[in-house]
Amino acid sequence: MLNVLITAGPTHEPIDSVRFIGNRSSGKVGIAIANAARRRNLDVVLLLGPVAASPAPEHGLAVHRFRTCDDLQTLLNAHIAAAQLLIMAAAVADYRPKPNSAMQGGKFRRTNEPVRLELEPTPDLLAGVGEVKRPDQYFVGFALEPQDELIAAATSKLKRKRIDLIVANPLETMESDQINATLIDNSGVVAAPGMMSKVDFAEWFVDAVLARVTR
Amino acid sequence: MLNVLITAGPTHEPIDSVRFIGNRSSGKVGIAIANAARRRNLDVVLLLGPVAASPAPEHGLAVHRFRTCDDLQTLLNAHIAAAQLLIMAAAVADYRPKPNSAMQGGKFRRTNEPVRLELEPTPDLLAGVGEVKRPDQYFVGFALEPQDELIAAATSKLKRKRIDLIVANPLETMESDQINATLIDNSGVVAAPGMMSKVDFAEWFVDAVLARVTR
């Protein structure tokens, strides 16, 4: 039975005890992929960010929750060695407040003055996993890019991060129930199934990836 | 039939086309209050932020969605004159990126460099509604404060914003299914029903407020 590790949802990087920097990922695609993989009797570990929806854990499906990019990195480190297939559908915020930056500690009290927030990049998780990938592992990433530079930006990301396959999505995918994905590997575009629901896409996508992993 | 206007959930202030500044409000208390008020045959307008859960609109319950503090202000301006009872359970992020600050326009590309984000305070909605309140209107606010300064900070907020009643909650209320609320008016603490589920609290709270509005 193939071991699949899937990341889904956004990260939230705390600014103070109530405010955070987030992104608009709904987690829908990653959760749908986890459900589709489970239905094919794959052994699924789902790493899921701070979203309200969560699949119930069941035989063959383990769910671990994360909030920040650091949380997700810790979970990835713990689970990646056992994974034969990794699908990185989570969308990290990429930036977080620097330690000791403005507003930190408890709940910052509102004033009428502007605030300068110093942000630092979070660890690049996709590049990190690309560096430790074994030849028997197959890694898939996601790229959310403006339509007019979709293929070029996603192809560049695929090569930079040294992964096997990237799913390119236009920005409009966010928070929609529909997706219009393009699959790209190191040979170029390999599939573009057109606009479909995220649930239908997940079913198609898992079969498409399994065909590539097991051939 | 009493007209009730309820705000619930967080605000999201965009940083770029995918990232935002948010807060950790789940909207659960405000949604539960809207449901409790509807069950008492009140005429309810619910202004609801970017959360996944939403009650289905039905006879006597209208739901309007907002994302930013500006969106919420526009909705408040449209609905406040008709409201006899206003319950401001939404939690605004209080700060947003200044126009033309770093990262804006499309999706900011991740770099390895720090970023300095200039934030400005959002309009103070609670103080704004306090200023236009008519004598026939009853306004309730919420305060989320550290336990050790809960009563003092909430009382100060009640007086500053010129509202009728404030619901003080410790920070631990966030994202919990439980709430330990203290109701404070201009005479001081008027009720502290103890720790209970947010749904049970909403039932108790609507009766407590109606008793005050109609006496």
Image (cartoon, coloured by chain):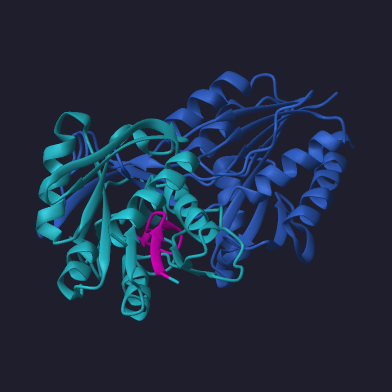
Chain colours: A blue, B cyan
Q: Nearer the viewer, residue B15 or A104?
A: A104
On screen, residue B91 above or below A163: below
- Residue at 67% from the left image edge and 61% from the top image edge: A177
**Residue B100 coordinates in the image, percent (x, y):** 25, 70
- Residue at 14% from the left image edge and 34% from the top image edge: B149
- Residue at 53% from the left image edge and 47% from the top image edge: A91
Q: Which residues are magenta?
A: B2-19
Asked if the magenta segment contains residue B4, the reply would be: yes
Instruction: From the viewer's perspective, tell me whether residue B196 is left or right of residue B155.
Output: right
Asked if the magenta segment contains residue B180, the reply would be: no
The image quarter containing residue A154 is bottom right
Instruction: From the viewer's perspective, tell me whether residue B158 is left or right of residue A78.
Output: left
On screen, residue A34 above or below A181: above
Quadrant of the rendering where the N terminus of chain A is positioned:
top right
**Residue A83 coordinates in the image, percent (x, y):** 70, 25
- Residue at 71% from the left image edge and 60% from the top image edge: A182
Q: Nearer the viewer, residue B123 or B151?
A: B151
**Residue B151 coordinates in the image, percent (x, y):** 16, 38
